[in-house]
Amino acid sequence: MEGQTVKGDATTEAGRGIAGAAGIIALGNVVSRILGLVRVTVIADLFGATGLVSAYQIAATVPTMIYDLLIGGMLSSALVPVFSEYAAARTQEELWRIVSVVLSLTAVGLGLFAVVLELLAPQVAWLLGGGLEAELQAVATTSIRIVVPAVLLLGLSGVVTGLLYTLKCFTYPAFGAAVFNVGIILGALLLSRPLGIYSLVIGTVLGAGLQLAIQLPGLKGSLFTRLSFSFDLSHPGLRRIALLYAPIVLGLVISQVQVAIDRNLASRTGEQSIAWMQNATNLIQFPHGLVAVAISLAVLPSLSQLSATADWIGYRRTLAMGLRMVVVLILPATVGLFIMAKPIIALIFEHGAFTAYDTTWTALALRCYLLGLVFAAVDWPLNYAFYARQDTLTPASVGVLSVFVYLMVALPLMKPLGMIGLVLADSAKHSAHALTMLVLLHRRVGSLRGHGMGATTFKAALASAVMGALTHWTMTWLQGLVNGGKLWSKLVVVGGAGLTGLIVYGVLITLMGVEEVKVVREMIRTRLLGSLTGGKG
């Protein structure tokens, strides 16, 4: 009995540790996602879901793709583990030395890459949007040339993020994406009349600069006192980063190739398809970023430390806690979004240049994306579990497999289903990746059985099903009651049905005795509310 008490205390403490770190990340994600919705609402109002928006989305994809390939994948798989190793076992001088080397190489490398992009902009525009008309491809080409500086700014921002995560400073990086959205919003509102669609491109560059700038205070004066330009290619830490990053390069390259193929194929299913798909993706990213990304980033340092000490019992316990938190939060979000897809899209997008026709197609794309959301959310902590063991080859290999799954589904379905075939293929890709990672993790570190995964998933699924039924009934009743296309009536339907679902799920999951409810409450109390009131965190 005493052993069970100790184990329970350790589990609760681990959960609180993860929740504490996840809380501030989640707060930043909440702000970011809200501003993201403001961003897409502004874009929809000013430009609708036209071919011009698709051309902009093609240009905006470029810095994102390069960041994901060169920095994003390295951040969790190599930068944080190596920086953490230096922070724990070396002197402060050695930590700042390796950081200086990485920042210097990033600046020079991405600077040269930006020059190449300027020269090859027409080819890149064709690669990502070859199905668009020549006029729209020309807009995409010009937009790519304007947005190129964002590549360098986002790259430097990513390295600083890795350093701050290592130092357990989550606040500044957590709000980086929020200010990125602010930049785009300002660009659209201030420059749309004189510059048209190019106002969004200028805003993207501004947002990238703000994302870097907001993190600099986290260095606490070290920017000029400890950092220096260093091109030391022989640094042992750099070699360690390269060794950890190299195995996942192939997977990342293939993943970005899939993004390029997806954009290219989508451009051939209609000039509005990319805009519809992007709007649906923006809505998916709200719960995904708020839940999966926040919890995964918070659990990575703990998993890395437990792996370094070969504490596999603690490792499995911590991972299971993170996975259970993801499941408890992502299942109701998925069900709620699926049921209220059309009213939510009508509320957020359907005004200005965005029509009811756009709402119908965006809602259809959203529902098809939602089929893979739970798998995509669970996949994040599973990937990070391998990164914590400094195993980057396995996630990369599985990534290659999942891209082939995407192609095997997308190519046959594209002709009969058009854009929807591509969205279904994306969901199939996420599902295949998550299931494969779960099987491989079981073989590497042992089973997660006995950690409440099955029971928690069943309870969350049951509560989500009941919540979904009552949410649908409430939504239908409210639609018949207000029956109007005005903003207030849309708000009543979405707000009323959403609040009903939230209350029902919260009550049911509490009555079922799901442990993660206590952890989430603690996260809200100590981190979210603490941050809002100026508390420490």
Image (cartoon, rainbow, N blue to C red):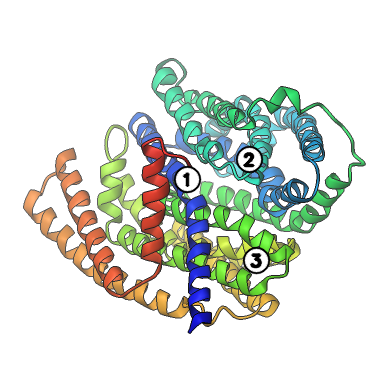
Q: Nearer the viewer, mark 3 or mark 1?
A: 1
Q: Residue at x 59, y 28 (%)?
A: 217
Q: Secondary structure at mark 3?
A: helix
- What residue sits right under mark 3 in the picture? 404
- Cβ–Cβ under 8 Å for marks 2 and 1: no
Q: Position of residue 197 (x, y in %)?
A: 47, 26
Q: Position of residue 210 (x, y in %)?
A: 55, 27
Q: Residue at x 49, y 70 (%)?
A: 9
Identify the mark nearer the N-term, 3 or 1: 1
Disc 1 crowd rating (10 Å Cα; few below 14, some 14-19, many 20+) is: many
> Disc 1 residue type?
Ile
Q: Which mark is residue 141?
A: none
- Separation of residues labelled 2 and 3 (CA atoms): 36 Å
> Disc 2 residue type?
Leu
Identify the mark nearer the N-term, 2 or 1: 1
User: Left or right: 455 with respect to 305?
Assistant: left
**In the orientation shown, which residue stands out farthest toward the front?**
2
- Separation of residues labelled 3 and 1 (CA atoms): 36 Å
Q: Secondary structure at mark 2?
A: helix
Q: Which mark is residue 164?
A: 2
- What residue sits right under mark 1 in the picture? 24
- Separation of residues labelled 2 and 1 (CA atoms): 13 Å
* Above or below: residue 370 compared with residue 176: below
Identify the mark nearer the N-term, 2 or 3: 2
> Disc 3 residue type?
Phe
Q: Nearer the viewer, mark 2 or mark 3?
A: 2
